[in-house]
Image: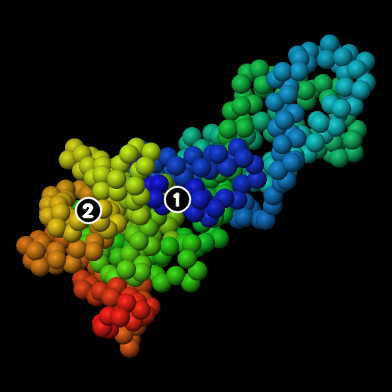
Amino acid sequence: MHVDDLHFKKDILPLFDFVYNEFSRDSLIGLLSELPASLEEVLIRQQIIKSLMRNEALQVPWSYHKSEFNEVYGYLESMKTRGIQLSGASLKIHLFFARSERNGEKGKLGQLVLFFYKIHQYYFSHLKEEPFPAVFGRQIKNCKEFFSGLGVIKYQAIARKRRFRIGEMAVVVEFLQEKIRQGEMDIFWKDLFLFEAYLSIARGIIKHHFIFPDFNSDNRDGLYISRFYHPLIKDPVKNDLAAQEHVSLITGPNMSGKSTLLKAIGICVVLAHLGLAVPADRCELPFFEVISISINLNDDLKSGYSHFMAEIKSLKKVVVEADKGRSCFAIFDELFRGTNVEDALVIATTTITGLTRFSKSYFFISTHLHQMKETLLPAHDKIGTHFIECRLDNRQPVFTYTLKRGWSDLKIGQLIFDREGLNALLHLPRV
């Protein structure tokens, strides 16, 4: 997956980020960064999220403070190194004589029990494992068993009154030490962080009214998205896309919104393959093994590549995978704008013609090469054309940001040049 140009961590992650600690956020970032290897794994993620969304009790507004979590997590981490490894009578004797340490331990244990009791009550007390996939269901069960073994229901009343006795303290400390020794505490935290990450995604989907996509059984069935939009745009224009052809060319004048439209398509495809819901009213698409999105590709100064060379490298990676028979989804924004028009026209024609033979893949290419309308399209019925509408009203461009079937020949560069008064300043005739 090459999707850096969608700026997922900066732009998309906040749509789903409702976690309360950095470890759960790391799990969330992992879920939004790692594509499942198969459609089966995608559908498993969908099942987890849908089951969380259907549980009304989990939608009750509730949170905990980051500092509250840090105190409990830090206390348990300190138990690994501070050396209280006593048990039974020895532990009770130690707590009895170490009065200062006992008082500090009592406060920490009370805080821990009350924190875990709240987690148990709001997350797990009403949650059944059956609606979830087997692995995730076992993780839920493990969390519930941890809280049961800790006795959070029993000890929370004691903790509220700050009346922990030495024997009760010893039981809780010994339980926690055993979990740490067996490595079960780390497993518990990992399961809890993953649970919070999935729950955060579910809350984001509900808040933004996204919908879950359907996957075609055959990659040749086409890609369809109804009323899709870029989720960061306020009051966006919602468009429909029906791509039966495996290569789709998108045209439209500068500033008409081609890059934003391509990003919106890319976001829908990537979110779908992450097992999440998408910003659309309906989405039906194939399952892709390779996803590559190149939008606003910049010169790679660190590697010494020019813009054109970066385009070539990006294209080659996708073509190599498609040539192996893998199903690919790729977006190329203004392909070959990094070279002169003559070269660009020749190699773009060669590229687009060649891409039509990969029947398991779908390619979306925006282009400024209007000459291809006459040189390429008449000979290829495997190429779909779409354009973003722009009208002229009293020689002024009116952008509708609406996607339509067909080809745009509209050029507005000279009009804008003239509108800004540059012809007059340069003492040139108006367009």
Identify the residue position indicated by label 2 in the image. 339
- Labels 2, 1: front one: 2
In the image shown, does 139 or 294 lie closer to the viewer? 294
Q: Quadrant of the C terminus?
A: bottom left
What is the x, y in percent for residue 39? 34, 43
Tell me: 127 left or right of 62.
left
What is the x, y in percent for residue 37? 35, 38
Q: Farthest top residue?
A: 90
- In the figure, 288 relative to 207: above or below? above
Name which residue type carries label 2: Thr
Query: Where is residue 204, by image quadrant?
Result: bottom right
Q: CA distance from mark 2 to mark 1?
A: 26 Å
Residue 392 seen in render: no
- In the figure, 365 relative to 304: above or below? below
Tell me: 195 left or right of 371.
right
Mark 1: few/some/many CA within 10 Å (<14, 14-19, 20+): few
Q: Residue at point 61% right, 27% down? A: 186
What is the x, y in percent for residue 345? 15, 58
Judged from the image, the secondary structure of the residue bearing numbered disc 1 is loop
Q: Residue at point 78% right, 13% down? A: 86
Q: Residue at point 80% right, 36% down? A: 111
Judged from the image, the secondary structure of the residue bearing numbered disc 2 is loop
Identify the residue position indicated by label 1 in the image. 7
